[in-house]
Amino acid sequence: MLDCPNPPPVTVILDPHDDVVHTRAALASHAPHEGRLTVHPTPGTDSAVALAHDILAALNKPVPLNSHRPLDPAPAWSTAAAWILATPITHLTLLRAHLLTPHRFKDLLALRRRTGVRLVLVCHRRTVQTFLERELRQVEHHIAEASALLPEAEPTTPQPPTPPAARPLANRWISLPALTTLKTFDETATPCRCTPPMATDRDFYPPVIPPVTEAEVARRLHRATPHPHLAAQLATAVFTAASTTQLNTAHVRDLGPDGTTITLHDHGLRQGCMTHPVPLWARPC
C-alpha cells in the first residue's frame, strides 16, 4: 500500500472537563458519506486490534472474524486503511484519546501516513500523556481547546426516524450470470502496459442486471464483505464477466484517475485487453 508523503497535521483537542456537549458535537460530526469519521473506542480494552475493529465499525463495515490470526493487528489495520481510501474518508476523529497506548498511537500514525487522513485526537484531560507529547514532537500537530473546535451544536427539532428502504432481495440468494466465468482457469498473464480499447469497441457488453439487483449487490458488497480486496474483485467481476486470472492483472495504473474505468488484460486468451466503464453502483463513493 502506498504512503502519503505529506499527511495533514495531527490535531489534539483538550477537553479537561470531559464535557458531554463536546462529545455530542464530535459524534454529531460523524458522516462517512461526507468523508468524516468519528470513532468512540470500545471501553475496557487497549488492544490495537480492537481499535482497528472500532474504526471498521464506524465505517459500517463488518469485522473479518476468521480471516486472520486474532492477535495479529496488521491485517485489521490494512483493511481499515483500504476502506478509508476507498470510501473515501478525509477526517478521522478519535474520542477518549487520553487512553491511547504507545502501540495504538503508532498504529494511528501509520494509518494517517497510509491514507492521508486528517487525524483528530480528543483528550478528555487538561494535558496529554507524556508519551503522546513525546511522539507528537516527531510529527506536525496543533493543540486546541474543545470549546474552540467542538462548540455546542444548535438545538434542533427531533425528527422521526426514517424507515429503512424496502429491499425486495433481502436474505435471498442472487444468481449473477457475469460470475459464471469468475473461476475460469486461464493461463497466467504476464504484466501488460498496453493501451487497450474500450470494451464496447470490441463489441463486448456485460450481462445486464435489473436496478433492484444492482442495489442489493452494492449493499452486500459494502455492508457484508469484510475485505476490501474481495469486494473490489466481486464488483469488477459483476460488470466485466472477467475471470480471476483477468482480475489479477489489474494494478493501480489500470484504474482511471477518477475511478470511472478499469483496464483488464488477457493477451487475447479470451476477448483481449479491454477498458471497462465502472457503473455508478460499483464505485466506492
Image (tube, helix red, strand yellow):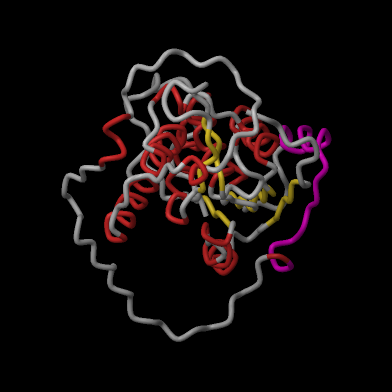
| Residue 226 seen by the camera | no
Which residue is drawn at the image coordinates 58% and 47% (left, top)? 259
Seen in the picture, residue 43 relative to 189 is either above or below; the reply is below
Q: Position of residue 228 (x, y in %)?
A: 46, 36
- Closest to the observer, 284 or 208: 208
Residue at image position (52%, 24%) is 249
Q: Is residue 10 magenta?
A: no
Residue 132 among those drawn in magenta: yes
Quadrant for the N terminus in the image: top right
Residue 94 as seen in the image, left or right of residue 57:
right
Most foreground residue, 186 or 141: 186
Asked if 182 appears above or below 38 in the picture, the reply is: above
Magenta region, residue range: 130-148
- The one of 209 and 62 positioned closer to us in this rendering: 209
| Residue 145 x, y percent position in the rendering | 74, 61
Whether residue 99 appears in this view of the structure is: yes
Residue 105 spot, x, y in % from top left:
64, 34
147 to 117, vertically: above or below: below
Percent x, y of residue 39: 52, 50
Residue 204 appears left or right of 32: left
274 left or right, relative to 193: left
Nearer the observer, 165 or 92: 165
Q: Residue furthest left?
A: 172
Taking the view exactly as shown, the residue that stands out farthest to the bottom is 157
Q: How many tags in the picture?
A: 0
Residue at 60 percent of width and 39 percent of height = 255
Residue depicted at 45% across the width and 86% down the height? 157
